[in-house]
Image: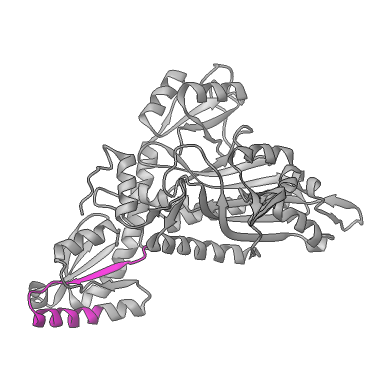
């Protein structure tokens, strides 16, 4: 089952082939929707577990809010509503009855949550309120659809908080973005950059938007997560107010932040190769596959007994191990299949290994194979899992640095964008230059780094730069 497309020469087709052949997804009968298969959903569960621990430590609690949003509620915040109208899917009929008011299938949940927040909050003692939900979202996207990266229904988490001051809300926004960077780098081994979105790119209705951006191997940026300070805008629309310690009334300062199942696609793109997926060990559905090699029933029995002596200690240590003793499949077939599915470490044991009282270990990330004595095998497997996780992040960081170019002129920016990657340049902070660059290059401003220094001239108009911006084409 070798892949027919190469990552370096046909990245888009390679990606589609990998996610299908490795059985991460399947297509639904509804265009733009996909089935998330077992391995991919397991990875999503690892992401959920990781974030839930961070959320809980900060006092964020999980809840669930309805999928349906009344059109009148969505229209209450005009800027928010207009920003989502092109992507909203509407329900106009229930059973045999035509609805008196259209219902939106949630594109995001501010307008269904905040009327309830107004009921729950009356005093400064009720703040901060911190709620998160894991749910599905519907956005009738008309852009190029791609599994995990851009689909009309996807899974995400959306955190929503209410605070008594802008300073508290600012701190929450940064804290959430830091969680996402930690998730991306420590769990997914995908390096990413933090910064602020421009006014043109911020979340509809927000005071400002912060973002986490990664660079994929094809030179396109991928937004890994966002965190928004909503100011008091939604609070005023939905009457989310509280009595202060001074017995006056004020509107709450609110935030929202989220990541989605596009993170799964980011991992596949970043680490995969011409053999298939390369899972970072921390999220791999199977971390170690053990393959007995035999030509008779007795050899099989001996090989499985030997494997048991290393598999059981690994299982006791929490390692996810699968022993592939399937009949009718050659060792070579099994090796290829598990490489396609991205298993970090493979243990092989055949007659030669048994004769030397040990096992052959293969690394998925480098392809290296080496024999180890039985007494060293468990210790070595644990060490390899840590090494692979660290190696994947280190390699990805090198690629990110290599594909980040500093430019000074529009000609250099155009060349950098065509080459692929981040083009870092001075910007005058005028939206007209931002829009002109987007029209001429297809690249937008992915982020403005926190505490960005203004250096030199604007890459487009030549006037004095007010900040530094990262430009790129994106998914």
- Where residue 474 sits in the image (x, y, percent)? 46, 36
Q: Is residue 285 magenta?
A: yes
Query: Which residue sits at x=37%, y=57%?
Result: 24
Q: Between 406 and 54, which is closer to the camera in this rendering? A: 54
- Seen in the picture, residue 219 relative to 174 is either above or below; the reply is above
Q: Between 165 and 38, which is closer to the camera in this rendering? A: 38
Query: Which residue sits at x=19%, y=77%?
Result: 374
Inspect this view and state whether residue 172 appears: no
The quarter of the image holding the N terminus is bottom left
Q: Between 119 and 167, which is closer to the camera in this rendering? A: 119
- Where residue 409 sits in the image (x, y, percent)? 46, 19
Inspect this view and state whether residue 250 appears: yes
Query: Which residue sits at x=20%, y=51%?
Result: 2
Asked if residue 369 lies left or right of residue 235, the reply is left
Q: Residue furthest top?
A: 462
Asked if residue 382 lies left or right of residue 170, the reply is left
- Seen in the picture, residue 2 relative to 282 is either above or below; the reply is above
Asked if residue 223 lies left or right of residue 313, the reply is right
Task: Please tell me in which quadrant of the rendered image residue 75 appears.
Answer: top right
Q: Residue furthest front?
A: 96
Q: Residue furthest right?
A: 247
Task: Please tell me in which quadrant of the rendered image residue 461 appears.
Answer: top right
Count of numbered circles on the image: 0
Query: Which residue sits at x=64%, y=38%?
Result: 83
- Where residue 258 sits in the image (x, y, percent)? 57, 52
- Where residue 85 sits in the image (x, y, percent)? 64, 39
Give the magenta-colored segment's residue range. 284-310
The quarter of the image holding the C terminus is top left
């Amino acid at each position: 089952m070798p892949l027919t497309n190469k990552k370096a020469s046909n990245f888009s087709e390679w990606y589609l082939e990998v996610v299908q052949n490795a059985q991460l997804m399947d297509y639904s009968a509804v265009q733009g929707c996909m089935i998330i298969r077992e391995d991919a959903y397991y990875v999503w569960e690892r992401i959920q577990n990781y974030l839930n621990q961070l959320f809980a430590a900060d006092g964020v609690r999980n809840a669930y809010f309805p999928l349906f949003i009344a059109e009148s509620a969505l229209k209450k915040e005009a800027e928010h509503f207009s920003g989502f109208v092109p992507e909203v899917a509407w329900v106009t009929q229930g059973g045999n009855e035509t609805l008196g008011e259209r219902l939106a299938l949630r594109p995001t949940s501010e307008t269904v949550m905040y009327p309830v927040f107004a009921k729950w909050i009356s005093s400064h003692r009720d703040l901060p309120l911190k709620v998160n939900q894991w749910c599905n979202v519907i956005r009738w996207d008309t852009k190029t659809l791609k599994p995990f990266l851009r689909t009309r229904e996807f899974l995400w988490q959306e955190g929503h908080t209410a605070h008594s001051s802008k300073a508290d809300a600012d701190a929450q926004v940064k804290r959430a973005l830091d969680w996402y960077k930690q998730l991306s780098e420590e769990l997914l081994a995908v390096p990413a950059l933090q910064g602020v979105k421009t006014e043109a790119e911020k979340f509809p209705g927000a005071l400002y938007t912060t973002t986490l951006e990664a660079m994929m191997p094809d030179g396109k940026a991928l937004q890994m997560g966002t965190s928004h300070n909503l100011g008091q805008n939604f609070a005023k629309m939905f009457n989310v107010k509280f009595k202060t310690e001074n017995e006056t009334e004020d509107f709450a300062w609110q935030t929202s932040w989220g990541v989605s199942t596009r993170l799964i696609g980011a991992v596949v793109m970043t680490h995969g190769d011409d053999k298939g997926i390369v899972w970072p060990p921390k999220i791999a559905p199977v971390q170690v596959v053990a393959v007995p090699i035999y030509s008779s029933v007795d050899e099989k029995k001996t090989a499985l007994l030997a494997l048991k002596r290393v598999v059981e200690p690994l299982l006791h240590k929490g390692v996810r191990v699968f022993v592939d003793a399937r009949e009718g499949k050659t060792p070579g077939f099994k090796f290829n299949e598990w490489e396609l599915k991205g298993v970090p470490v493979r243990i092989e044991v055949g007659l030669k290994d048994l004769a030397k009282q040990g096992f052959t270990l293969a690394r998925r990330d480098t392809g290296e194979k080496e024999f180890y004595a039985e007494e060293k095998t468990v210790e070595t497997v644990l060490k390899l899992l840590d090494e692979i996780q660290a190696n994947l992040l280190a390699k990805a960081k090198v690629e990110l640095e290599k594909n980040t170019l500093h430019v000074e002129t529009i000609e250099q920016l155009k060349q950098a964008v065509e080459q692929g990657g981040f083009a870092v340049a001075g910007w005058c902070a005028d939206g007209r230059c931002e829009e002109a660059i987007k029209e001429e290059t297809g690249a937008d401003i992915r982020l403005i780094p926190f505490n960005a220094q203004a250096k030199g001239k604007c890459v487009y108009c030549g006037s004095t730069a007010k900040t530094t911006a990262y430009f790129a084409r994106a998914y």
